[in-house]
Image (cartoon, rainbow, N blue to C red):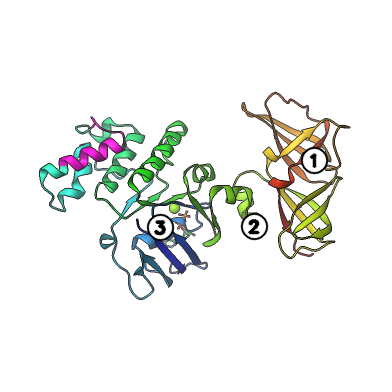
């Protein structure tokens, strides 16, 4: 199905100093679930509105299946793009039944009553609302209302579905279930989904690819695993969950691999980004689940020493904050049964394959 090619897209609103979207390029293949992820105000909704055709870019282009749909000179209007849109606030008509809500888009296209009934029935089946035809939105839960909104957008068979934080008004349990359903619906329909969220867990769970955006600029575009485990920069590393930075100095470099001497003890052999030379100061980014606390004394040469300064019981894990001898604050997660006391001195080993090295700007 539909592929979207965004090239050097920029948009600045009148009277604002910074661009909401700045020189953004993204190649979205057809039949994909792609998520735009970033903090509030980073330009996600603006990007979605540019894709939908509600906004004209200042510069750059958008092509859908090779056809130019947006540029600074001309914009194909939303109603001629065959795109559907689902918003955070379930935009359903309160005085229409579920059936009437979903059927509306087909009726204005003047389809026959029989076909409308068949297509609405099929769609309600798909979103798990078969049997709810006669209900009013006030007789539905939030999740059910959002599924009506989804059915209404899907029933007209858009090439692309744009979803702007559609689950953020649902409670945690329902949100998780809806995630799974959305993903299944995307798979079954083959429609290209462009999904907007500020929730990194949601993005990881749903997406074929994630575009991380910060201050209107694309930071990284890739599969969830890549974005989480191999962040392109500190902003991405930080946004995609908890991360600690351990200062180190590179001792020796050979074929992209290096020996890093950690501040506060220990050495680690790891992959280095290009441009790092022996003697450089670096920061090693590591996630809490990739640090192992080992008993003092038994630890190998890779170990860092530190003192536990905080402990939080999370149910499925213990979260510790350890102050290393080198002065870094390290977040560590352990199995819930591995209980350690605040004040205890511990050794820690980092999994070198799960670490990312960032060069440090001089000065
Ligand atoms: P997000 O959806 O990621 O939270 P938005 O795309 O809504 O972010 O907004 C990006 C930036 O553009 C923000 O700084 C926001 O204040 C600004 N902005 C959005 N819409 C308008 C508008 N209509 N007029 C002026 N500024 C806007
Ligand atoms: Mg938004």
Q: Is residue 120 magenta?
A: yes
Residue 97 position by quadrant: top left
For the record, the magenta segment spans 117-132
Query: Picture coordinates of residue 357 (x, y %)?
Result: 72, 54
Residue 11 in sight here: no
Left or right: 292 with respect to 73? right
Residue for badge 2:
233
Q: Quadrant of the C terminus?
A: bottom right
Judged by depth in the image, the label closer to the viewer, 2 or 1, is 2
Residue for badge 1:
323
Residue for badge 3:
48
Label 2: element kind:
loop
Q: CA distance from mark 3 to mark 2?
A: 24 Å
Label 1: element kind:
strand
Residue 131 position by quadrant: top left
Q: Nearer the viewer, residue 20 or 100?
A: 100
What secondary structure prevails in the magenta region?
helix
Ligand 1 has an atom within 8 Å of the beta carbon of the residue at disc 1: no
Q: Mark 1: give few (<14), some (14-19) or many (20+) Cα within 10 Å.
A: many
Q: Mark 2: give few (<14), some (14-19) or many (20+) Cα within 10 Å.
A: some
Judged by depth in the image, the label closer to the viewer, 3 or 2, is 2
Give the residue displayed 85% in from the left and 45% down from the top.
Answer: 266
């Amino acid at each position: 199905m539909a592929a979207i090619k965004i090239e050097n897209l920029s948009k600045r609103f009148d009277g604002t100093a910074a661009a909401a979207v700045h020189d953004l390029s993204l190649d979205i293949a057809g039949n994909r679930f792609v998520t735009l992820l970033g903090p509030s105000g980073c330009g996600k909704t603006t990007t979605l509105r540019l894709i939908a055709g509600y906004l004209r870019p200042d510069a750059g282009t958008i092509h859908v299946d090779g056809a130019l749909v947006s540029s600074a000179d001309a914009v194909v209007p939303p109603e001629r793009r065959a795109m559907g849109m689902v918003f955070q606030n379930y935009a359903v008509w309160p005085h229409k039944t579920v059936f009437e809500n979903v059927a509306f888009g087909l009726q204005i296209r003047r389809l026959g009553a029989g076909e409308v009934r068949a297509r609405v029935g099929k769609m309600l089946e798909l979103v798990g609302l078969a049997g709810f035809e006669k209900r009013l939105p006030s007789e539905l839960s939030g999740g059910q209302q959002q599924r009506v909104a989804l059915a209404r957008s899907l029933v007209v068979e858009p090439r692309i579905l744009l979803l702007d934080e559609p689950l953020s008004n649902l409670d945690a349990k329902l949100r998780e279930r809806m995630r799974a359903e959305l993903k299944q619906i995307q798979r079954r329909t083959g429609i290209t989904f462009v999904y907007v969220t500020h929730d990194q867990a949601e993005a990881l769970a749903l997406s074929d690819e994630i575009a991380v955006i910060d201050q209107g600029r694309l930071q990284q575009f890739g599969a969830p695993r890549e974005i989480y485990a191999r962040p392109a920069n500190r902003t991405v590393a930080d946004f995609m969950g908890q991360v600690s930075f351990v200062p180190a100095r590179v001792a020796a470099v050979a074929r992209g691999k290096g020996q890093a001497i950690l501040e506060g003890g220990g050495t680690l052999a790891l992959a280095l980004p290009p441009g790092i030379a022996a003697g450089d100061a670096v920061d090693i980014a590591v996630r809490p689940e990739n640090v192992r606390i080992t008993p003092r004394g038994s630890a190998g040469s890779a170990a860092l020493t530190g003192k536990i300064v905080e402990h939080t019981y999370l149910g499925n894990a213990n979260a510790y904050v350890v102050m290393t001898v080198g002065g870094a604050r390290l977040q560590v997660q352990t199995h819930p049964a591995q209980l350690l006391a605040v004040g205890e001195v511990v050794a820690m080993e980092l999994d070198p394959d799960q670490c990312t090295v960032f060069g440090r700007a001089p000065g």
